[in-house]
Image (cartoon, rainbow, N blue to C red):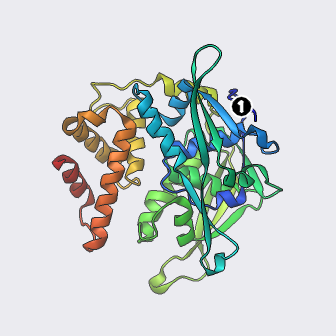
């Protein structure tokens, strides 16, 4: 089996099976979704022996966006998390509720190369191989750079869901199925106006700015009770106005340059600081504005400095608290002032 050693190339191609694109990865962060795209760009879909991809440790750190120095035990937790990512799909009994669940990756190994530099090797799970190497025409392609500047899971998934249909020029999908494919709980954004403002418009702006496609959308077909929008039609347009492409090498270089600023405050508008805030916004499903998240960020720095300087831990903490707030709201008929409630949760920890 070949070790597919990472060679940086601006025009890496991702080949993704249509079935794999229709799956909902369980609890994957933006960094893990991005890593999966990078993994797919490094294998040869016609050669199963390329299933093992080897990353220099420093590149792996940049891709996963580890902002502070971590030790081997921390890496064990991170790679264990990658190995626990699963997908679920119907089997031959799918019409009766049958399904199969399997992992995307089966093995991570930390080794040293011939120069004594640490490297991480990632191997795909055997059950996932048919959806990575036996494509048989049921797949689509895109250049990797399209996913590197996107700022949230919703944006990355929306790009892939529409890119698959680019040649057709449009995609008609139910709002329920779209939420599922984006990884959004079916009961979240129950009002279409919230879904439109916090997800659709955000994705539309991001794709038009950073990728090779843009889109418009409109309600489609009959509406539900009370005029509820049930289906959407997306018109997919070749985008010629995106910003300069960023290759994987430049992306890694930019991520390595980041250094946490001990003196960053809520008045800091530097690109690096804003990038952190946008990352944390994703943990809260973009529920709160940039200014509100800057306030939460400062509150975390004051109340919990032990996790503040680790962005992954900060992200996971906010995600946990946001889900806790969401569950409380569902059980108690909603929360009127979500930001105030969330801020009080953080401040009381």
The quadrant of the rendering that contains the N terminus is: top right
Report the residue at 61% width, 37% height from top: 243
Q: Position of residue 180 (x, y in %)?
A: 53, 65
The vertical placement of 267 against 154, above or below, is above
Q: Mark 1, residues whose alpha carbon is within 10 Å: few (<14), some, or many (≥20)?
A: some
Q: Mark 1 = which residue? A: 3
The vertical placement of 218 against 269, above or below, is below
Residue 127, image quadrant: bottom right
Residue 241 seen from this side: no
Question: Is 214 on the left or on the right of 320, as rendered?
Answer: right
Question: Is 239 on the left or on the right of 30, as rendered?
Answer: right
Q: Where is residue 148 in the image (x, y as percent from the top left)?
A: 58, 38
The vertical placement of 157 against 34, above or below, is below
Q: Where is residue 219 in the image (x, y as percent from the top left)?
A: 57, 73
Residue closer to the observer: 117 or 6:
117
Residue closer to the observer: 34 or 211:
34
Question: Is 19 on the left or on the right of 336, as rendered?
Answer: right
Q: Where is residue 265 in the image (x, y as percent from the top left)?
A: 27, 31
Report the residue at 21% width, 53% height from top: 345
Residue closer to the observer: 174 or 322:
322
Residue closer to the observer: 63 or 119:
119
What is the secondary structure assignment of the residue under circle 1? Answer: strand
Report the residue at 69% width, 61% height from top: 19
Question: Is 56 on the left or on the right of 26, as rendered?
Answer: right
Residue 311 seen from this side: yes
């Amino acid at each position: 089996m070949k070790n597919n050693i990472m060679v940086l190339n601006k025009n890496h191609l991702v080949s993704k099976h249509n079935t794999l694109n229709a799956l909902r990865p369980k609890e994957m962060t933006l960094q893990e979704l991005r890593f999966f795209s990078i993994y797919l760009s490094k294998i040869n879909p016609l050669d199963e022996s390329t299933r093992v991809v080897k990353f220099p440790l420093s590149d792996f750190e940049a891709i996963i966006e580890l902002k502070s120095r971590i030790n081997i035990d921390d890496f064990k937790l991170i790679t264990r998390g990658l190995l626990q990512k699963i997908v679920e799909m119907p089997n031959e009994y799918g019409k009766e509720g049958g399904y199969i669940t399997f992992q995307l990756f089966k093995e991570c190994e930390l080794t040293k190369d011939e120069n004594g530099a640490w490297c991480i090797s990632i191997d795909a799970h055997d059950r996932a191989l048919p959806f990575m190497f036996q494509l048989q025409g049921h797949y689509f392609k895109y250049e990797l750079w399209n996913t590197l500047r996107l700022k949230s899971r919703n944006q990355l998934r929306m790009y892939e869901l529409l890119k698959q249909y680019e040649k057709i020029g449009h995609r008609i999908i139910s709002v329920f199925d779209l939420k599922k494919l984006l990884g959004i709980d079916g009961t979240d954004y129950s009002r279409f106006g919230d879904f439109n403002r916090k997800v659709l418009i955000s994705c539309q702006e991001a794709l038009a700015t950073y990728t090779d496609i843009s889109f418009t959308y409109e309600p489609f077909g009959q509406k539900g009770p009370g005029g509820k929008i049930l289906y959407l039609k997306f018109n997919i347009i070749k985008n010629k106005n995106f910003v300069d492409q960023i290759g994987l090498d430049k992306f890694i270089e930019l991520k390595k340059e980041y250094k946490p600023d001990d003196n960053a405050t809520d008045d800091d508008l530097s690109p690096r600081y804003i990038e952190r805030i946008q990352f944390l916004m994703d943990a809260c499903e973009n529920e709160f504005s940039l200014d509100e998240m800057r306030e939460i960020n400062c509150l975390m720095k004051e109340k919990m400095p032990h996790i503040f300087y680790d962005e992954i831990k900060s992200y996971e903490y906010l995600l946990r608290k946001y889900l806790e707030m969401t569950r409380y709201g569902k059980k108690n008929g909603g929360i009127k002032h979500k930001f105030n409630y969330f801020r009080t949760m953080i401040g009381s920890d």
